[in-house]
Amino acid sequence: MMFRRWWQAVRRYLEDDAFRANRRVRIAIYVLLGVAMYLILLESILPVRYQFSVGDISPATIRAPITAVDTQATEAARKAAMAKVPKQYEMSSQVETEALKSVDKLLTTAAQTVANKSLSGEEKLQAVQQVAPAKVSADTIKSLMGMTPRQIHDIQTVSDSIVKDLLGAPFNQQSAQQGRLLVDSKLLNYDLDRNARAVVQDVVVSVLRPNMVYQRAKTEEARQAAANSVSDILIHQGDVIVSKNGVVTASVLSKLRDVGLYSTRPNYGMSFGFALMVAVSVGLLAVYVERRSPRRRLDNLMLMVTSLVLVLMAILVAVTKAIINAGGPASTAYLTPVSLGAMLLAVLVDSSLAVVGSFYVSLFFGAALGFDYWYTFIGIVCSLVGAYGVAKVTSRGTFMRAGFFVAGIGVLAVSTRHLLQTDHSLSWQTFLLHVGLIALNGVVSAVLTMGVLPFFESAFGLLTAIHLLELSNPNNPLLKKVLMEAPGTYHHSLIVGNLAEAAAEIVGADPLICRVGAYYHDVGKTRRPLFFVENQMTGENPHDKIAPSLSHLIITSHVSDGLAMLEEAGLPKPIRDICATHHGTTILWYFYNKAREQDKNGTVQVDDFRYPGPKPKTRECAIVMICDAVEAAVRSMAKPTPNRVEGVIRKIIRDRLQDGQLDECDLTLQDLDAMVGAFMKTLKGIYHSRIEYPDPDKIRKEVAKG
């Protein structure tokens, strides 16, 4: 009970003009909308960042939000390709030249030394040792000293030939290790004795070394070419990087870095960029709202409701992204009821704002899901269809019909994406899943719209088409009360409702508000129904027995009584405004004239017999005021011919204009003139002329006499 009283006080503040027209409140709403959108969606816009260490356990299944290069796997593949490239060598002729030079120098010196008779044996040995290669053994030198120059020459010829054969072709390290075997195989081609063979073998082996020189630059170039030929190994969007409860390895950390999911510091750049995005979006929304025509401009209450709808949609988008970040399937996005916001705005505000809201919400929807254009496209088309589908609500079934339309256009949008994809990575099973989810999305959006609408209606006292249709039900307790206790007033209200609806359609006002407001505008008469002429069935008028001032008080009190009854029943402000203003500050001329006739001192003032007001501030209130007076005046006419009826209507409108009753509403003279035609058309169907039927009893008596 305490909460109810508190909320009623809040409702009264929200409905007060001081709140609805306050410029500072308006600016605060825009600022709070921007702050709320930023705080709610920031985590959805920023890529998720993890701070794992090797050996940690992942709390959720982490999928790649984008397609990126797997640097570790790509680097490993390139290293493997480089390792398969052998070292690059180039054969050097210098090795052969130096080997021949060493062999020739040794054997030529040996031949000359042996031929020199003046040298002693020791001197000969020393002379040969000085020119012999380091690997030549002492036994070989001694053997050379025991040979003749001719024999040494033959050995030189064979040695040179073998050196040329071996070093004239590629001779690598492995060949050098098998030098003796290679020389032995070559010696088979020559007719030498055992001693000579041993000398040739030792001399040739001593000068053999690899003639293949390692080319470092060419090797590196070949390996780099092999590495460049390896294609990048990709981490595809949606791939599982680590499963829930999986161990974080070095490879997992590398993949997290590659897809931007690992960081040790906040992303200030993206945070600031998103702040700019929100500021620009809210600014453009504010420009659109503020530049609307005066008739369609939102007051602060409706601006607050619009902001709440946008915040609600931001929460749904953030929840969707949180589910995906927690390891849920990426296809969850297709189930997000993105058209809910457009439907709510179309019903609560108007279709034009719902269109703007569709683009607004869809842009943030796509941004939250990795700035994916296709999600934005799907959000826009579904939202627009939802907004147009509920533009004219006639029953609850309108929402379900709109939901099916959203489902159908959603299926087309998903099919479009499937047909236009370039990589053809989407399987038919996934495509069918997306189609099923988007179709279910439309139905879910419709159901949620029907479920959320009553909250806005009751919390903020908003009038929707559905609420108006419910209020127009004759079984409503207040309408039943009027019917049972003041039947004349009930009939009068029905006719006023018909007139008001016809006039509203002509001038562009809300016909449903006018009709329902007319039904409830005189509920206060149920407090004292017999004091109103339409309920006096016996012909006795209680006003004949009381003073005119008291009659004025009783008659005017039906407005305040009606307001109290409507507020107690919880009817929204637009209906209460119609009740409060349906007489404006007009004068009760009948009781004023009666008081003036009874006043002998001339103290009666015309303003003492006015209604307390206020004057109508909306077209709907002004229309009901005029219709109320027109119906009462035409009903009281003895012979309501078309010309007389039109004259009475124009006189009533003229009187209201001259009395200043229409000064605070935005009805134009053109609107008022158009309303006359609507009134005439409607009244012709109600007060049309009828033929006079003969009296059956009189006819029977005449027949009996005749």
Image (cartoon, rainbow, N blue to C red):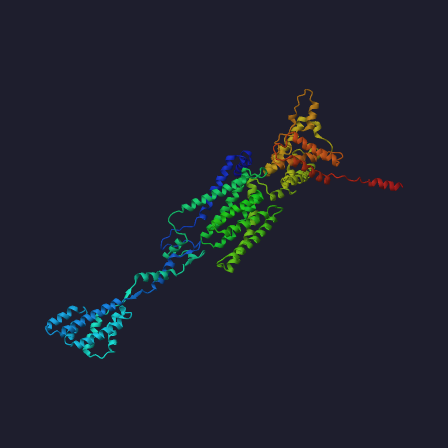
642 horizontally vs 194: left or right: right
- In percent of width and height, residue 562 lies at 63, 35
Residue 662 quadrant: top right
Depth check: 194 or 68 in front?
194
- In percent of width and height, residue 679 lies at 69, 38
- In percent of width and height, residue 652 lies at 69, 32
Residue projecting furthest to the top: 601
Depth check: 562 or 162 in front?
162
Q: State which quarter of the image contains the C terminus.
A: top right
Residue 520 quadrant: top right
Q: Residue at x 54, y 56 (%)?
A: 415
Depth check: 638 or 110 in front?
110
Q: Is residue 418 above or below residue 19?
A: below
Residue 243 shows up from this direction: no
Residue 456 shows up from this direction: yes
Q: Is residue 677 above or below residue 89?
A: above
- In percent of width and height, residue 71 lies at 38, 56
Q: Is residue 318 above or below residue 189?
A: above
All told, the count of numbered labels is: 0
Residue projecting furthest to the right: 706
Q: Is residue 14 above or below residue 223?
A: above
Q: Residue at x 53, y 44 (%)?
A: 309
443 horizontally vs 483: left or right: left
